């Protein structure tokens, strides 16, 4: 499945637009899915919360984000009997909002599952980093699920910022994002409160800036750079950096910005020194 600081202040509310597609949830029959105490293989039913995007595919026609599982997807489930994360592979449901995953695990009272990242932690807390990738038509967003059965309802822990760049032949080396709050926007810490994930961020200095390293030659046609970031309130805004062969441009917003879960926001910038 497939998801900094000289200031030129941007009018944040005018620059951003949120795009969200909510698809109906599909129900799974639990028939035949009962788990014995010890088994060689277990099937988990994995659906997407109504605000969750697993594979975020932007459609120019509908101006929405499509929501699907994809062939080759895997999830990690914490096995507290062995105190390690176990990989489960998709066996059914690619191209839909609900899927089935198979793997080996002993029966337990609570299951914590993660998609899109290599987690640390256990069945009460989870910590992971968000890997930044250049996306063409999709993005991978980390999700978590907490369940007392083999039915998992995944929820996104992130939002998506798309930076659309235009220019006049400049060669882009990298684009950077930095939150003005004291936390690393690529490191997430989650604690579960009655099964609901509470998200907080880690203050790791060398991770305060995240980069998209995809190179491009700018023109009047926008080139998109995507950042997967934790959802929540970004107090005092953020900074954007565009490093090219002719110099570095910095754009900033000093206003509080709220990034919603599973939301894509887009900012359009023209490169200028």
Image (tube, rainbow, N blue to C red):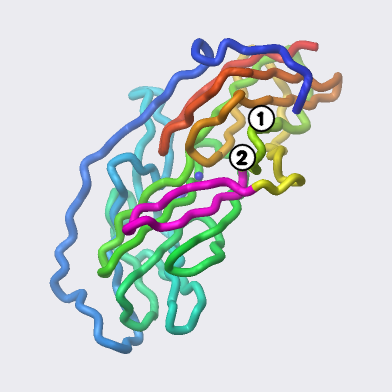
Q: In terms of image quadrants, where is residue 99?
A: bottom left
x and y, in percent, of residue 168 in the image: 74, 12
Whether 49 is drawn above or below 125: the answer is above
Task: Give the magenta-colored segment's residue range.
Answer: 186-202
**Residue at the spot x=78%, y=19% of the render?**
6
The tag on residue 217 is none
Of residue 56 and residue 185, the one placed in the foreground of this image is 185
Q: Residues within 10 Å of mark 1 (few under 14, many from 20)?
A: many
Residue 201 on the magenta segment: yes
**Residue at the spot x=53%, y=66% of the render?**
121
Residue 168 on the magenta segment: no
x and y, in percent, of residue 53 in the image: 38, 42
**Residue at the spot x=35%, y=46% of the render?**
68
**Residue at the spot x=48%, y=50% of the render?**
142
The residue tagged with tag 1: helix, strand or loop? Answer: loop
Q: Main secondary structure of the magenta part?
A: strand
x and y, in percent, of residue 74 in the image: 44, 63
x and y, in percent, of residue 147 in the image: 30, 64
Q: In terms of image quadrants, where is residue 114?
A: bottom left
Left or right: 208, with 3 as reference point: right
The residue tagged with tag 2: helix, strand or loop? Answer: loop
Residue 231 in view (yes/no): yes
User: In front: mark 1 or mark 2?
Assistant: 1
Q: Earlier in the sequence, mark 1 or mark 2?
A: 2
Identify the residue position indicated by label 2 in the image: 134
Left or right: 6, with 84 as reference point: right
Residue 138 in view (yes/no): no
Whether 195 is drawn above or below 267: the answer is below
Left or right: 52, with 134 as reference point: left
Identify the residue position indicated by label 1 in the image: 180
């Amino acid at each position: 499945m497939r998801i900094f600081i000289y200031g030129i202040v941007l009018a944040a509310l005018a620059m951003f637009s949120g795009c969200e597609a909510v698809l109906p949830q599909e129900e799974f029959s639990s028939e035949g899915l009962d788990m014995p105490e010890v088994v060689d293989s277990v099937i988990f039913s994995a659906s997407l919360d109504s605000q969750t995007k697993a594979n975020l595919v932007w459609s120019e026609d509908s101006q929405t984000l499509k929501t699907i599982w994809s062939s080759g997807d895997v999830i990690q489930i914490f096995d507290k009997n062995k105190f390690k994360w176990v990989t489960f592979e998709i066996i059914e449901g690619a191209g839909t909002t609900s899927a089935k995953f198979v793997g080996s695990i002993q029966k337990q009272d609570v299951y914590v599952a993660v998609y899109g990242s290599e987690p640390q932690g256990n069945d009460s807390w989870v910590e992971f980093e968000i890997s930044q990738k250049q996306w063409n038509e999709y993005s991978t967003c980390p999700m978590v699920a907490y369940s007392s059965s083999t039915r998992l309802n995944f929820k996104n822990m992130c939002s998506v910022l798309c930076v659309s760049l235009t220019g006049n032949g400049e060669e882009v080396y990298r684009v950077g994002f930095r939150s003005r709050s004291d936390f690393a926007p690529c490191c997430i810490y989650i604690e579960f409160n009655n099964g609901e994930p509470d998200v907080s961020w880690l203050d790791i200095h060398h991770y305060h800036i995240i980069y998209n390293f995809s190179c491009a030659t700018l023109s009047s046609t926008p080139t998109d750079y995507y950042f997967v970031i934790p959802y929540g309130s970004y107090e005092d805004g953020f900074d954007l950096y565009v490093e090219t062969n002719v110099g570095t441009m910095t754009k900033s917003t000093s206003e509080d910005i709220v990034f919603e879960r599973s939301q894509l926001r887009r900012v359009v910038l023209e490169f200028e020194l």
